[in-house]
Amino acid sequence: MNGKPVVIIFLLLLASSAALFFMPADEGSFERENRSRTELPHLTRDSAFSGEFASSFDSYVNDNIAFRSELIAAGRYIDGKKGVTPPDGKVIYADRDIGTETVQKACMLIADGKIMEVFSENRDAGRTYAAAINNIAENIPTDINVYAALVPTQLEFSDKVYSSVQSSQKNAIDDIYSQLDPRITGVDIYSSLENHTDEYIYFKSDHHWTMLGSYYGYTSFMRAQGKPAAAISNFEKHTQGEFYGYLYEQHPDGDIEKDVLEWYDTSKSADLTVEMESVKDGKPYKYTSPMFDTTKNDYSFFFSADHPFTRITNNSILNGETLLVIKDSFASDFVPWCVNDYHTIIMVDPRTYKGNLRDLFNENSISDVLVLNYIFTTSFEDYCNMMIDMFK
């Protein structure tokens, strides 16, 4: 008799879990995380015995439940209360997923009203990352300029009592740049950001840089090309509103301050066309999205979210130059700075792009290639392999 309540509670929990799975998935959570929903994996003998199928199926189940955002927030809130709280900040241990379906153990530091990812260098993955960029250069015509840009995160420029808990991002960036083919130019974004650490160049509750931070990255890119950068004063500044970013949503904590979404209208004097391409149900399709989505009030304000393929055409610029950006989400507020320097900009996300870069180069007169990612991307070998696979 005494066991009946336990059985009833267990059955209710089981039924609730099943109901969550069969209800519509929380699509909004993937927009906020800038990735696509995990698809049902294919079961093969190799994937079954290697454990790959079990891992992928677990990700599939986690991605296809209703109220995912609310459940994650509740779980992260409980985890956050388990965080270690030394005098120099609160340390939280969690999982990190950059949208490649591989989950790594991660460490977050909450200090000075910010939540910051703690970087741990992975030299093997860093070598694979450098090899992936070298592979791009080897497979394209020699008259195309190739640039590599790695973006450090805000913990690197925080007080030493905080930044000392992680691997040196500068050393990791320098090490990767040193392995690049001489044909490839490493863009020194690090120094530009280092010179402006007293400005609002990173969000407090999100891992991305602000549009002001990406402006300094843009000036570094133009400097690497030997070209002048547009003055920031040329563009009208707007404030979209306050918000809590992705890291806060994953790890809600009362010590984290809200952010303000500020943006500069680089499109005002430009005649822009923005088109996206993707694959749905095995078929390619095209759609449009604004460069600045004023219906959003978080980082997805820029291009509405990440997309597999984006083409921006500025009909006001007739120089015939085309920039290909192979990127993660850090390019979303960087590329708007470049739209007045190129007739066409193509953005490709290795995590979701299903095309072949050989075809892309054959079909477009690409003049420059920029591989732009944030430093944590270099610790995910599967992301590096995705860049390599784009030429297969």
Image (cartoon, helix red, strand yellow):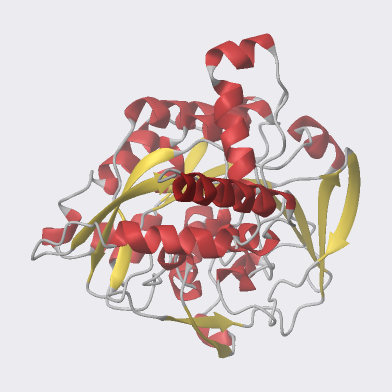
Give the residue displayed 75% in from the left and 57% down from the top: 24
| Residue 124, image x, y percentages | 37, 25
In the depicted view, which residue is nearer to us: 231 or 310?
310
Q: Residue at x 58, y 86 (%)?
A: 234
Q: Toward the viewer: 177 or 227?
A: 177
Q: Residue furthest front?
A: 1
Which is nearer the eye, 319 or 134? 134
In the picture, the quarter occupied by the C terminus is top right
Rendered location of residue 16, percent (x, y): 61, 53
Which residue lies most toward the left here? 87
Inspect this view and state whether residue 224 appears. Answer: yes
Query: Residue 136: image x %, image y %?
Result: 62, 31
Q: Can you see residue 324?
A: no
Q: How many marks?
A: 0
Q: Residue at x 80, y 45 (%)?
A: 365
Residue 167 placement, left or right of 59: left
Q: In the image, residue 13 lies at what x, y percent?
A: 55, 50
Residue at (89% x, 44% y) in the render: 284
**Rendered image quadrant of residue 209:** bottom left
Quadrant of image for the N terminus: top left
Which of the 4 image quarters holds residue 57?
top right
In this picture, residue 373 sits left or right of residue 126: right
